[in-house]
Image (spheres, coloured by chain):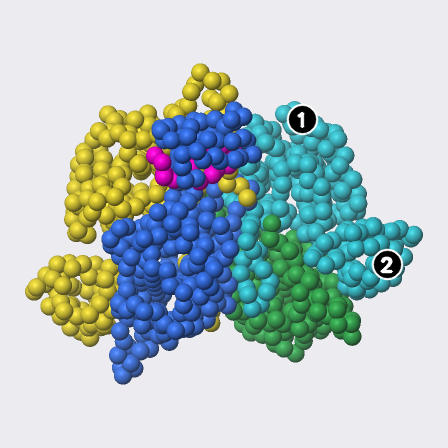
Chain colours: A cyan, B green, C yellow, D blue
Amino acid sequence: MEGDLVELVGLNHKHFIILLKPGGEQHTHRGVIRHDDLIGTAWGSQVQSHSGSPFFMLQPAFNDLLRSIPRRTQIMYPKEIGYILVALGIGPGQHVLEAGTGSGALTTALAYAVGDTGKVVSYEARPEMQEVARKNLERFGLANRVDFKIRNIEEGFDETGVDALFLDVANSYDYMHQVRGALKPGGFFGSILPTTNQVTKLLYALRQEDFAFTEVLEIMLRFWKPEPDRLRPTDRMIAHTGFLIFARPVIIDHTEETTSSLVEEGWEAENDI
Amino acid sequence: MEGDLVELVGLNHKHFIILLKPGGEQHTHRGVIRHDDLIGTAWGSQVQSHSGSPFFMLQPAFNDLLRSIPRRTQIMYPKEIGYILVALGIGPGQHVLEAGTGSGALTTALAYAVGDTGKVVSYEARPEMQEVARKNLERFGLANRVDFKIRNIEEGFDETGVDALFLDVANSYDYMHQVRGALKPGGFFGSILPTTNQVTKLLYALRQEDFAFTEVLEIMLRFWKPEPDRLRPTDRMIAHTGFLIFARPVIIDHTEETTSSLVEEGWEAENDI
Amino acid sequence: MEGDLVELVGLNHKHFIILLKPGGEQHTHRGVIRHDDLIGTAWGSQVQSHSGSPFFMLQPAFNDLLRSIPRRTQIMYPKEIGYILVALGIGPGQHVLEAGTGSGALTTALAYAVGDTGKVVSYEARPEMQEVARKNLERFGLANRVDFKIRNIEEGFDETGVDALFLDVANSYDYMHQVRGALKPGGFFGSILPTTNQVTKLLYALRQEDFAFTEVLEIMLRFWKPEPDRLRPTDRMIAHTGFLIFARPVIIDHTEETTSSLVEEGWEAENDI
Amino acid sequence: MEGDLVELVGLNHKHFIILLKPGGEQHTHRGVIRHDDLIGTAWGSQVQSHSGSPFFMLQPAFNDLLRSIPRRTQIMYPKEIGYILVALGIGPGQHVLEAGTGSGALTTALAYAVGDTGKVVSYEARPEMQEVARKNLERFGLANRVDFKIRNIEEGFDETGVDALFLDVANSYDYMHQVRGALKPGGFFGSILPTTNQVTKLLYALRQEDFAFTEVLEIMLRFWKPEPDRLRPTDRMIAHTGFLIFARPVIIDHTEETTSSLVEEGWEAENDI
């Protein structure tokens, strides 16, 4: 299993994700763990540090991979990432665009989901930021599925007719014309924005560029303490990550007044129940 | 595009998912739409029913495919399905087990995510229920990725060493021994249960069978009305689908008292923030 | 108990709030109930309609009184009303202002809380609306604690130096100067607004008029099904009533630049945890 | 204003609640504030510590009084306290029971709400705990409205026919017979419990003692950052305080089988929407 990514989980769920190499060592506050003791050990086994502290050796959870990415930018959690994958219909073989790359959390999820036959193109204006993301993707063995591009997307995307495009940039509303040019008609657009002021601006821009079926939503995840005889939610939780916005570009004949007005009023998704 | 799945979306987001066949007709409360008018039309275009009502012709959203599945059993929403995919690390090429098949919503998502190189095995005790699910999967072109099995899982699973297993059955806590036998050590187990009484029982069963890193959580999704100058949440929302429970089987030496007790107390995920 | 308000609750919590009068009759879809059968009956007793359907005779719950008020305007629920009472510090003997009266739900709660020694002044621009509210208050025996005034509050309030003032009008942000004039320094201001666009406007207006300790919040209440062995939340819930905004006018020396800028940046309540 | 309770609020909403006495001093990390400088100063004014740091002098917010109570026991927040007041119909002149006294947060709210003509009786098994609460109430000038009693409520309450009774004890389900004896028929019972296991036990006990109209609920409050041009929720929030349970004792003729079974099935509040 040399070269495998391994997750070591100690007491209190303290965990490390490491790449196994002969002779390697992982230093923890509960003692040193030698890679050679791990190579050849069965997944799920309990191992011990040199000081006798117990750890489990596990195949890394995708969740924990995502959580292990150093966060320099806006935070996106598995609750958002999972929903984005479903809402954009990301699956094996697809071609997907995203900007910006950020620390690469969503890039990782997209690259994982499109598989060997798919492709992710990830734009980022800041070279040093994308370099961090690239290293994360390489560590996870997913970098070969990603085209990293350094570009301010104000200049537009190289691609056209793509299936799905996600924007994680603070002023995504400024690039709807460029997004429109890259997506195929009926393709899937998504964005995450932290403030309602930004959401308002994006909703105006989406109408301007003939996007329809717009959805705005937020996802709240509450963990519970897993104690069977004292079952209760945790005391605190994340109150807000960002608002998720989804929409699809459609082809509208603006010479017909009725149709045109429909876009403004009639093509919002109706999610009130 | 004959043989394609097409989504027609009319005013108020009323939508239909249809399989295009020459000569076919879709009857709606806003008039009839002829399949021949759709074949050859570009994705994202606006079409009209014979009575002049506007519809957009779109590639079906994965979300809408899931929503289009007739629900005879417990409801699972995209918010849960997306999170399950991430939490179980479902991706191209994986082998996944689930029980029961139910109406096939999760089966669809799993089959979509594992791709052509993956495999989903779906157990169900009620033949007529699985038949409904199979038809849904066939309609989506995903049935070839699924082994449907009619079986009460009390008798156990045929497979061993699988990566991930999800139980959507009311008494999932009765089958933890069988689940343990099917999953590889460190594999990913998940379940959804509507009541706290069931969660309590499952948490006891998980400890009994040496599962660790247990997480219990619930996901609340709130849609907002996508009106830029009157931005506000919808009036009503889904308050509860079910509690999601995740855990991983580990290998524990029960002759060591310390380790054994650790499982009961020390290996819960710590999600309080 | 002639003249008492009585709550009759039938199966499925169907309830009626009635004023007992000799000879009176309450017609329900489960039969007629004669007031004379109720007069003299103990609180909490079970009574029957002429067709044998069971009802309990109860002292009206304050909650149910509030819920019984016909809603013609924006809805405020007990979850908001209870919080408003605490946040504004409403108690026996206080003088409180509100605008608009609306259907009188908050007026009822305020009048109840200030007691015989307190006073509520309620402004409303639409006479017919206030008339409805006045009748509700009379029915509950609380009208004598309220001064109803017909006035567009753009013209200002008659009162000065009041303890607390609540605005339930769509453009509350237009009246902050008038509110400032009515409240005593350090008094309590509150408002409810449904959209984030309105909240943004109010926050600007509050800074303009030297209000500090501003809080913006929303309250979500989730009911659970009270079944001990199948304990779970209800399926649906109210997703949004409105955003509550609270602030207090302070006295600021604007000749001192430091202090002045502090109001803009430093006097927000810190509620992140 | 000697003898007044005063709230001093500094930058970042750091606040102190103090009792003004001639010659007194309040030491803060931003310098010393002399009480003599405050006596005679108008509410809402800005004052300075000896080192020049700005503070506002305010009438204490009821909210802040509650928050200022040292917490040694289970936490109840204004969101719960406000709802309890409305749900139990607490107002001027009422007689209310509670157990246990705890640190006195709810006692304070009840005493404030019932006014000079009302009465709160507060039971507590631990003398030292009640002493802390009594001191808090004395500080707020509310102690004269409260009868403090040291008693394990297993022995029952002295009072009968009371309007409302609230239990904030971990095993409230053990005392439903005693509660039944103290409340008038149709009176209001409430309790707060942190775990679902406790809620299940209480629901069984309530049925056993002929309580009806049972409601179980939880209240989630989310603060927003009050910045008009970057409006968004705070990053974190309280995820759980406790489940609130409300019910009312009714008089049931158990010789009638139909009626008796109704209590088990038909008299739950229906809050699904």
> Would you say C20 lies left or right of A97 here?
left
Looking at the image, is C130 positioned above or below residue C181?
below
The amino acid beneath tag 1 is Asn
The amino acid beneath tag 2 is His
Report the residue marked by disc 2.
A50
Report the residue marked by disc 1.
A152
Viewer-proximal residue, A168 or A210? A168
- The count of marks equals 2
Whether residue D124 is visible to the viewer of this picture, yes or no, is yes
Looking at the image, is A217 positioned above or below residue C4?
above
**Residue A77 in the image, given as x and y percentages of width and height:** 62, 46
Same subunit, tags 2 and 1: yes
Viewer-proximal residue, C69 or D177? D177
Secondary structure state at the residue bearing disc 2: loop
Instruction: Answer whether labels 2 and 1 touch (C-beta < 8 Å).
Output: no
- Please tell me which residue is depicted at 71% across the width and 41% down the height of the picture: A70
Viewer-proximal residue, D136 or D10? D136
- Please tell me which residue is depicted at 23% across the width and 43% down the height of the picture: C118
Residue D189 sits inside the magenta stretch: no
Q: Which residues are magenta?
A: D1-17
Residue D14 sits inside the magenta stretch: yes
**Residue A82 in the image, given as x and y percentages of width and height:** 61, 50
> Would you say B138 lies left or right of B49 here?
right
Chain of the residue on which disc 1 is drawn: A
State the quadrant of the N terminus of chain C.
Answer: bottom left
Chain of the residue on which disc 2 is drawn: A
- Please tell me which residue is depicted at 53% across the width and 61% down the height of the picture: A232
Query: Which residue lies most toward the left here?
Result: C23
Query: Which residue lies most toward the top here?
Result: C255
**Residue D185 in the image, given as x and y percentages of width and height:** 26, 69
- Please tell me which residue is depicted at 54% across the width and 26% down the height of the picture: D51
